[in-house]
Image (cartoon, rainbow, N blue to C red):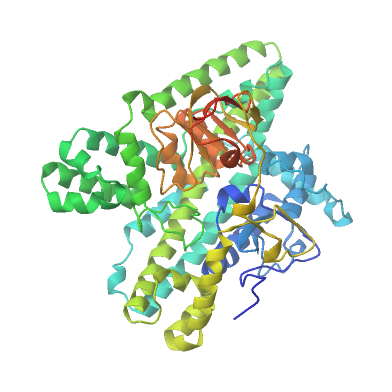
Amino acid sequence: MGNDNKWVGDSELGERFPAWTRGNAADVFPDPFSPLGKSMVLQLSMSPGLRDAYIALGALNYDEFENPDTPDLFKMFGGYVYNPLTLTRVFGYRMPGATPEMIDKAFFDDNDEVPPYEHQDWHDSPDNDAKLGESMGWAMSTTELPMLDADRDMVREQRANRPDLAEMTDSALLARARSMVPLLQRCFENAMVVSSLASLGPGALAAVCEGIGDPSLSIRLLAGIEVDSAAPSHAMWELGRVAAASDAVSAAFADGPDLVLDRLRNTGGADADDFLERFDAFLFEYGARAQNEYDIYATSWEVKPRIALAAIDLMRRSDESQAPAGRQAASIAERDRVVAEVREKIAGDPETAGLFEAALGSAQRFLSGRERAKTNTITIINEMRVAIREYGRRLVERGVIDAVEKLFMADNHQLDRIRHSPESVVPALDSRWEQFQTLFEREPVFMVNGRVPELSEMTRRDAETVGTVEVGTVLTGAAGSGGVATGRARVILDAADPEGLEPGDILVAPQTDPSWVPLFVPADGVIVNVGAMGSHAMIVSRELGVPCVASVAGATKLIPDGATVTIDGNAGTVTIDALPD
């Protein structure tokens, strides 16, 4: 049944790329990853996509990767996904004008456990330096990213033309899921091309602002950039307004989000039917979003709409002043004011003025593009997910397994074995499922460097200790989205269960993948445990005009639920104003 001190999906280490980190991974891959997710998403799709992106950018050559035909570029240890620190640092070393340390700052959280960069002779490559320089020039000058628009059209076509899964044979369901692999590889390659270059514009803006004596301006210059991953929040706000305007729909929300849809279907009437029709359209457009959404095991909004309904309920009870469109407009106005201020200050320096305009355009295009690329990727993963879940539903119905979720404990090859010889694999799925649940109770080590850790080296979450705070304590993180807000802190650990969060509160969260974004709307500010400069929380909070401080280590444990706090998104600080009674 396996080694209790090792997870079945854990990776092996190679010599060329020994260092791997949870930095930034905790934001993108917050929870343990299923064996099927690792097999179909990480290994078959995303690792080749990252390989191809780095080659396209000129960062590495094909044969410089370990096992380039079947790369493993998102390692798993203790069930958690790790980012390739060594690989990314080689990218930084070869990038003209950059350093490995600059790449660390742009993409990974600050942490004392991160080892210093270690140079190796093979890192030196004038040819790759030159190719990367060309890619940088393109990123600072291009006015469009057409490959992302092409990917968006492709994934929308896949969603619109999804066959009736209930009518497909078992074989056709598995073929449908597997047919998404090359499409996911394509989307992820483009996502990594854009993401890898997304820090150039913001970095140049920061340098310009520092040069004129006010580094804090750089955050405000990035405000109000329209991103696809914020679009669900705008749609939810409109659904919340529809619900608020109807006594019948509001009454359906009275007992919580779990029963809303059933109550509306049973109630009937014009208002109920209208809301249900609008919500179905919402799920068609945005239902791919989920917590830990890169894992096909995750329950997307389409599969389990509770998260979306809980957020809509919060917005239903919110004041019109918290409308995301209004906040975004105010954020854009402030950005435009700062742009004009900077332009005035550098008007007499043509070289700096030229850099500023190029950097501003690049930052807007690539930060927006990064979120579009992620949306494309997630949409394809959801097409995999719903096909696999339909197959799992049938296996439960036939008595082969006792829960749909256990099917995700298989790998890609075992899906065929389950079809033809289920008795040979189902006991392993049961054992893995039992062990998988325990992984959620453990905190993964932050760094893996040259040695694979065992499960016993992971701290139990309920055994973690942090310091204490008192009135006047100032916690420091990363400035994410400009603005200052004071309010009641609400510590929320699960986006699907935002119990206690009320409009006007300060949301304190462990991490914020897109499933958390709707909770930003009713909040007056956001504090996050993790997140580097390019993190999702920062990008989306700036688009929505919500003050945000990220990378506040241990915030969800340090900040008492109900405390009054002031967050300064320009300075990256959180001040404890009052403790709860």
Position in image of residue 178 (x %, y %): 47, 70
- State whether residue 225 appears in this view: no
Position in image of residue 390 (x %, y %): 35, 70
Q: Is residue 291 left or right of residue 303?
A: right
Whether 404 is drawn above or below 118: the answer is: below
Position in image of residue 32 (x %, y %): 56, 60
Whether 40 is drawn above or below 424: the answer is: above
Q: Residue at x 42, y 25 (%)?
A: 327
Report the label total: 0
Q: Residue at x 65, y 76 (%)?
A: 3
- State whether residue 193 appears in this view: yes
Q: Residue at x 58, y 60 (%)?
A: 46
Of residues 131 and 432, which is closer to you in this image?
432
Of residues 266 and 413, which is closer to you in this image?
266
Q: Quadrant of residue 344?
A: top right
Position in image of residue 21 (x %, y %): 70, 53
Q: Residue at x 74, y 63 (%)?
A: 65
As drawn, the residue found furthest toward the left would be 269
Quarter of the figure with the N terminus: bottom right
Of residues 444 and 70, which is closer to you in this image?
444
